[in-house]
Image (cartoon, helix red, strand yellow):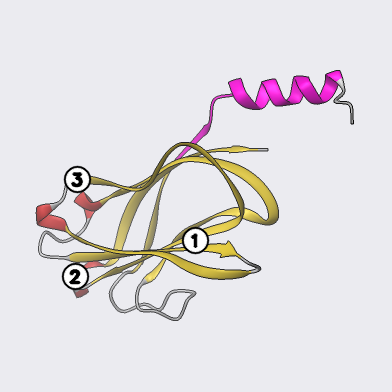
Amino acid sequence: MFVTIKEIWQMLMNLIRVPTIVNSTTTANWNSGVATSGQPGADLFTLGTPGEWFKLSEIYLGLYAFNAAATVTVRVYEEILGAERLVMDEDYIVAAEPDIVFIFWFWEIEMYGQIRIEIFSDQAADDGLAAPYEYRYKEL
């Protein structure tokens, strides 16, 4: 099997291209809402397209926006073996954690399908809060 010059060029461009950085917020009922999974909380965001590859570098969550007394649960769902599966379920105590936490941190990893981040806060005062996040990715 031969690789064309065009294919080699595309591979090189994927290696040197800088990632897209997305900074945003999601406003939701983090305590009284119901996320896509049916668990309490709400969806922070979904990244990726079903059936397609992308490269993911980092995902951050700004805990500083939540009530200081809160315990924030972060759940990550990924498409694995043809179904969406829970791959991470972590609790963060806002007063004891850094202002910004890594949800994922890689040099760069290829991902397939979608990844969805859900959040739950144990404080009703966090309902209606704009939760800040950032992620860095490359489309393939």
Q: Position of residue 14 (x, y in %)?
A: 65, 27
Q: Residues within 10 Å of mark 2 (few under 14, many from 20)?
A: some
SS under mark 2: helix
Q: Residues within 10 Å of mark 1 (few under 14, many from 20)?
A: many
Residue identified by numbered label 2: 125
Q: Which mark is residue 116?
A: 1
Give the amino acid at mark 3.
Answer: Asp
Image position of 12 (left or right of 38): right
Q: Are marks 1 and 3 in contact (CB under 8 Å)?
A: no
In the picture, the quarter occupied by the C terminus is: top right
* 3 or 2: tag closer to the N-terminus: 3
The front one of 134 and 73 is: 73
Mark nearest the camera among 2 and 1 is 1
* 1 or 3: tag closer to the N-terminus: 3
Residue identified by numbered label 3: 99
Which region is colored magenta? Answer: 5-22
7 in the magenta segment: yes
Q: Are marks 2 and 1 in contact (CB under 8 Å)?
A: no
